Image (cartoon, grey):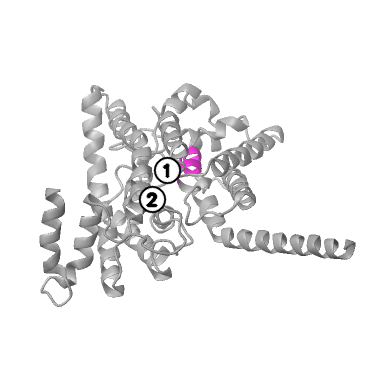
Amino acid sequence: MKLSKISEKLSTHFEKGKPLHCFSSLFDAVDSFFLTPKTVTTSGSHVRDAVDMKRIMITVMVALMPALLFGMWNVGYQHFLVTGEGTGFWHCFGYGFLKWLPLAIVTYISGLTIEIIFAQRRGHQVAEGFFVTGFIIPMIMPPDVPLWIVALATAFSVLFAKEVFGGTGYNFLNPALVARAFVFFAYPSVISGDSVWVSGALDAVSGATPLSLALNGSVEQMPSVSEMFVGTIPGSLGETSKIAILLGAIVLLFTQVASWKIMLSVLAGGWITAAAFHLGGLSPLPGWQHLLMGGFLFGAVFMATDPVTAAHTTARKHTYAILVGIRAIVIRGAHKGYPEGMMLAILLMNIFAPLIDYCVVRLTIRRRKVLISRKKIRL
């Protein structure tokens, strides 16, 4: 109640015609983050419950927390494993936290600045969508990526993958993946290779991920399945621990924020394709093992299920998600220069999702017209 009263008093200074009106979008963003949004549905035929955009975003961020916390510890663990220093829990966690914090600060400052500028120019409220995007971007970047590159990638993704199309809800590409793709193609040296995935690793020290080892044919050097499942392997901050990712998936499914159809179909498409590659002698690994490598599981749970950029309705969700899984494995196997096929597969299917929606709708309409015409003939 005290926060609400303080907010009401401060809001008068940001009203139209007041000196601080130019910062009204910034005030609204901060106010909406701490308090219930002031704008709610009051008329029209809408389904109403306790869920709004803010609560959905908070749920996704809660689901990401297990992967984030484990990733902080693992960044420190991998660093001290390479340097030969002690690997105490808090020692590792503190090191990883200090690597994540600057990335998160830079991401939110660069992204929210653009969001606020566009919201102010359009006279709109700042959408809550970027809070999740800004949460994910540091989780899919190498720990030692230069901060200016993160700022540039974030600004590019918000500006060209989101705002030019109208903002949250109108973008057809996942902004977090666009940021990673920007770094991958514009500055490949900071996101490719073995040493980038272990903070402070020397060139002489290998920080190779299981995925890069598998694609290079070094299967005997790969970590065990248990290590890949637990996550004590080199990799980006949020993608290594499959246990943590599955805990996040349980949260998303229990709250019905994400679609289990998309998650399951992505895994099915990837597993079947990888198994076919293995049987055909194109991959030395069994199909299920591909699901534990790279960002496949993280992408299936948190990226492919994005309600804005994914396909809709049951039939289209299955088609979209199966193709994501298939394309991810095909990209991995077809070109060693693109080991993280999940990123490119989701972005590619984001582009085709509207086409899938259109085709399925047109086929449904045509089928119903045929059924109606047949009934008329019978009558």
Image-quadrant location for residue 357: bottom right
Q: Which residues are magenta?
A: 294-302
| Residue 345, x across and y down, in percent | 55, 51
Of 22 and 365, which appears nearest the observer? Answer: 365
Of 110 and 74, which appears nearest the observer? Answer: 110
Q: Is residue 347 left or right of residue 198?
A: right
Image-quadrant location for residue 115: bottom left
Q: Residue at x 49, y 61 (%)?
A: 172
User: Does the residue at mark 1 contact the one at mark 2 (Cβ under 8 Å)?
Assistant: yes
Q: Looking at the figure, which quarter contains the C terminus?
A: bottom right
**CA neighbours of label 1 inside 10 A, class few (<14), some (14 to 19), many (20+):** some
In this rendering, the count of numbered labels is 2
| Residue 149, x across and y down, in percent | 30, 56
Query: Which residue matches tag 1?
Result: 193
**Residue 237 in sight in this render:** no
Q: Is residue 372 left or right of residue 223?
A: right
| Residue 316, x across and y down, in percent | 62, 53
Q: Residue at x 47, y 22 (%)?
A: 226
Verify whether residue 216 appears in magenta.
Answer: no
Verify whether residue 299 appears in magenta.
Answer: yes
Q: Is residue 317 left or right of residue 164?
A: right
Q: Which mark is residue 189?
A: 2
Q: Secondary structure at mark 2?
A: helix
Amino acid type at mark 1: Gly
Q: Residue at x 26, y 71 (%)?
A: 120
Of 133 and 273, which appears nearest the observer? Answer: 133
Q: Main secondary structure of the magenta part?
A: helix
Query: Looking at this rendering, what residue extends furthest in the bottom direction?
Result: 17
Of 33 and 89, which appears nearest the observer? Answer: 33
